[in-house]
């Protein structure tokens, strides 16, 4: 690069540096001390909500954007503080009953991990119930902004709900799993497609030649049909694996399940979640005098059990979504994303022949 080009480059950078809005500029405009601006933009409780809002609006008016290097330094300092310091991340719960999400073992594990990893980054996680009697989305939004909360983690939605009536502008937000379809947000989820491929590959290596998959319509929809899609793709692209027709059915339909098992006589049955695995285990035990017992496995095996299948890395899911949301908060990247991303977390295969054969 010529000296003339370098000179122009330096002049441009110098001009951009002068144009960058600083906290001192915001302080002068708002008539407060620079420290007050810093605390207000971090949502510190020592600054009254109305003052935080006034300073935030001033910063937006001036076009303020934090220096990412400084944000990273602040983040590093926060990580050295005990859990409970720093800003708050909202865990947004839209279930009809407040504690319904806690019926899921996985969700409870993920929530505990969210709290732990958020604490390591200097944040705390607090649950907010969006469908609380008398609550509206507009009022919830005001509550979060008045408290200086700019990061939101969306709890998985109920099975019959895929749209959330909430304005995510002014927030850095991401959703757990695939249940939220609209508005479009970033997601962190188990990689159901590759997990199914992993299960099929391991079952084939174990010598199984008649492998099938059964799940309920509700579970199939919650994972965005990805497990089923992977199974069908493997079935038609690799016929030598011996994959049988899958069954999407209400698993409480015992006669239909029995008929399916007796007709197909699979030597391995893949299930989607722990509850469905347990139901199929009972069915296979009942039919053991009629059919050869298939190996049962589950694509969502619990770490504390001995079921054959794939153990989802729930800790990694929690860490990924905390890092995603807090990083966006610290870079002041608020509002809807143009091209939402999905972070996929793979699992680990575990084989236990004795636990997988009901009559063993």
Image (spheres, rainbow, N blue to C red):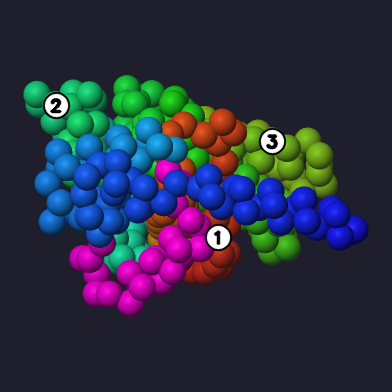
Identity of the residue furthest to the left in this view: 134
Callout 1 touching callout 2 (CB < 8 Å): no
Say whether residue 260 is visible: no
User: Looking at the picture, how far across and down is residue 331, in whole percent?
Assistant: 46, 51
Marks 1 and 2, the one that precedes in the sequence: 2
Q: Which residue is mark 3?
A: 232
Q: CA distance from mark 1 to mark 3?
A: 20 Å
Q: Secondary structure at mark 1?
A: strand
Q: Secondary structure at mark 3?
A: helix
Q: Residues within 10 Å of mark 2 (few under 14, many from 20)?
A: few
Q: Which mark is residue 53?
A: none
In magenta, the rendered stretch is: 64-93
Identity of the residue furthest to the right in this view: 2
Q: Which residue is mark 1?
A: 347
Nearest the camera: 231 or 11? 11
* Residue at image coords 49%, 40%: 186
User: Looking at the picture, how far across and down is residue 202, in whole percent?
Assistant: 67, 61
Nearest the camera: 318 or 258? 318
Q: Which residue is mark 2?
A: 135
* Residue at image coords 32%, 22%: 165
Residue 236 in which image quadrant:
top right
Task: Give the vertical position of 139 relative to 148 (above or below).
Answer: above
Residue 171 is a magenta residue: no
User: Looking at the picture, how far across and down is residue 168, in whole percent?
Assistant: 37, 31
* Residue at image coords 86%, 60%: 3
Residue 71 is a magenta residue: yes
Q: Secondary structure at mark 2?
A: loop
Task: Give the vertical position of 26 relative to 229 (above or below).
Answer: below
Residue 170 in which image quadrant:
top left
Callout 2 touching callout 3 (CB < 8 Å): no
Marks 2 and 3, the one that precedes in the sequence: 2
């Amino acid at each position: 690069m010529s000296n003339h080009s370098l000179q122009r480059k330096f002049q441009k950078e110098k001009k951009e540096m002068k144009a960058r809005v600083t906290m001192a500029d915001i302080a002068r405009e708002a008539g407060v001390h620079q420290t007050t601006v810093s605390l207000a933009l971090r949502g510190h409780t020592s600054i009254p909500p109305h003052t935080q809002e006034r300073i935030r609006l001033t910063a937006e008016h001036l076009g303020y954007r934090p220096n990412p290097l400084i944000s990273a330094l602040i983040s590093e300092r926060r990580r050295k503080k005990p859990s409970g310091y720093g800003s708050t991340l909202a865990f947004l719960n839209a279930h009809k009953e407040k504690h319904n999400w806690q019926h899921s073992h996985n969700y409870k594990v993920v929530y505990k991990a969210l709290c732990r990893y958020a604490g390591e980054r200097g944040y705390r996680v607090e649950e907010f119930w969006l469908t609380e009697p008398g609550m509206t989305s507009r009022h919830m939004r005001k509550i979060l902004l008045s408290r200086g909360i700019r990061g939101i983690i969306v709890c998985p939605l109920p099975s019959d709900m895929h749209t959330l009536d909430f304005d995510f502008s002014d927030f850095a937000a991401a959703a757990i799993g695939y249940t939220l379809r609209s508005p479009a947000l970033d997601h962190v989820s188990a990689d159901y497609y590759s997990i199914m491929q992993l299960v099929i590959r391991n079952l084939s290596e174990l010598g199984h030649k008649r492998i099938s998959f059964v799940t309920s319509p509700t579970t199939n929809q919650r994972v965005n049909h990805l497990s089923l899609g992977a199974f069908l793709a493997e079935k038609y692209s690799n016929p030598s694996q011996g994959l049988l027709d899958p069954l999407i059915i209400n698993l409480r339909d015992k006669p239909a399940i029995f008929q399916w098992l007796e007709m197909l006589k699979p030597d391995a049955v893949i299930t989607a979640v722990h509850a469905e695995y347990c139901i199929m285990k009972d069915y296979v035990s009942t039919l053991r005098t009629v059919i050869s017992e298939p190996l049962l496995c589950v694509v969502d095996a619990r770490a504390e059990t001995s079921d054959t299948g794939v153990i989802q890395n729930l800790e990694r899911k929690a860490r990924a979504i905390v890092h995603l949301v807090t990083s966006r908060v610290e870079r002041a990247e608020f509002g809807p994303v143009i091209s939402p991303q999905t972070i996929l977390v793979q699992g680990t295969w575990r084989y236990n022949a004795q636990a997988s054969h009901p009559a063993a």
